[in-house]
Image (cartoon, rainbow, N blue to C red):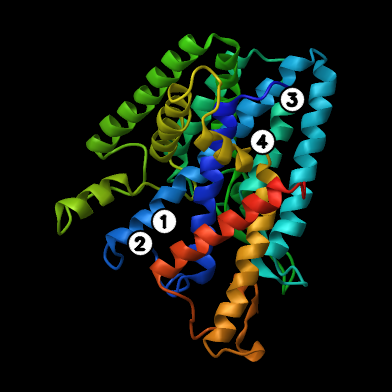
Amino acid sequence: MKRFASIDTTRGIVMIIMALDHVREFLHRSSVTQDPTNLQTTTATLFLTRWVTHLCAPAFVFLAGTSAYLSFQRNNDKSEARRFLLYRGVWLLVLEFTFVSFALWFDIHFRLLLMEVIAAIGLSFIVLSFLIRVPSRIIGTIGILLIISGAFLQNVATPSNPAGTFIFSVLFRPGLSRITSSHSFFSAYPLIPWLGIMLTGFAAGELFGMSPERRRKILLQSGALFLLAFLVLRSVNTFGDPSKWYVQKSFLFTVLSFINVTKYPPSPLFSLLFIGITLFIGITLVVLSASGEKQTIVSRILSVYGRVPLFYFVIHLFLIHALMFPVLFAQGFSNEDFVFGAFKNGRPETGGGIDLAGVYISWIAIVALVCLTTKVGVL
C-alpha cells in the first residue's frame, strides 16, 4: 500500500497529543479528584490541556477508516479484504482486553475490562468487513447518519435488565455491567457513534485517489463545512449535544463553555468539531505545507509516530503507568499505599502526583523516549 505522508504525519500529531492526556491522568495531582472540564472548579490551562486531547480518539478512528480504504486499493479481492478486516478486528479486541487493560490498571486479576478506542476500532472493522462491497460514498453516508443519530439517542432510557444494559452500553451509551461479584465490564467507547466516525473516514479515503490539488481543495472545503456546521448548531444551543453552553464569569470561560462538548458518548457536535479540526488542521495544513506528498523535516519526525500507531499506543501506556510509581515512591508512598482493582490503577487514596508543569515535562520525555525506541527498530 502506498503511504501518504499527510496521513502518517497527522496521525503522528494525534499520537503525541494522546500521550499528554495519559500523562495527566496518571501523574497530575488532581486527576483522581477533579474533572478538568468542570468550569466551576477548573482553570483555563487545565481545561485546555484536557480539551485539546479530545482530538485524539476521533482523529485516530477517522484515519483508521481512511487507511482501511487505502489498503484495499492494492487488492480487488473483496473476500480477502473481508477476512483481513475480521481478523484485524478480532485481534484488536483481544489486544484491548489483555495488553491494554493491563497497561491501564496493572491488575493481574483483570477485575475491570474497559472498552475504549482500540476495541471500538476493532468492532468497527468487523462491521466494515460486511460493508466492503458497498460503494464508499454510501458507506460515508451511513457514517454521517450514525453520527447524527446520537442526537436522538441522548434521552433514550437504558434497559433495566442486565443483558439489555450490556448490549445498550456496547452499542450506544457508556455503562457498567457486572460480570461476576468481583469483575466488571465498562463500555467507555460504545460502537455506534465511533463506527459513524470510522465509516466517514473510510469514505474520505477516496480523496487520496485524486490529484494533490483537488484533494487539498476538497479537504479544505470539507473541514470548513464541518466547523461551520458546528458553529451554527452550537450557537443555536438546542440540538446536537446534551451539554449546553452558558455565559460564564469571563469571556474566556464563555468560549470554553461553548467548545465544551460531550465525548462520552461523542455527541454529533463533538464529532463535527473534531473531524473538522482533523481535516482542516491535521490533514489540510500538513498537505498544504508540503509539495504534494513530499515531507518536510518536521513531518518526517512526526510521521515516526504515525507509521506505528498501535505499537506507540501500547508502549506509551506502559511507560507512563510505570513512571507513576517512582514519582509516588519519591513522594514518600510505599507499596501498601497503592490501590489496584476496578477503576484503580495504583494511585493512593490520599493522592500524590505532580503539578501541571511537571506533567508537560514528563510528557515531552515520554514522547522522545518512544520516538527513539521506534527509530532504533524495536518494531
In-image side of 331 versus 375 (left or right): left
Q: CA distance from mark 3 to mark 4?
A: 10 Å
Q: Amino acid at mark 3?
A: Phe
Determine the CA span between mark 1 and mark 4. Answer: 26 Å
Residue 27: horizontal and vertical position, in percent?
51, 70
Q: Are marks 2 and 1 in contact (CB under 8 Å)?
A: yes
Q: Secondary structure at mark 1?
A: helix
The residue that mark 4 highlights is: 124
Give residue 340's position: percent from left, percent from top: 66, 77
**Near-viewer residue (270 or 210):** 210
The earlier-in-sequence mark between 4 and 2 is 2
- Residue 88 position by quadrant: top right
User: Residue beneath label 2, please?
Assistant: 46
Q: Amino acid at mark 2?
A: Leu
Identify the mark nearer the N-term, 3 or 4: 4
Tell me the CA gap for discs 4 and 2.
32 Å
Q: Nearer the viewer, residue 154 or 260?
A: 260
Q: Which label belongs to residue 130? A: 3
SS assignment at label 3: loop
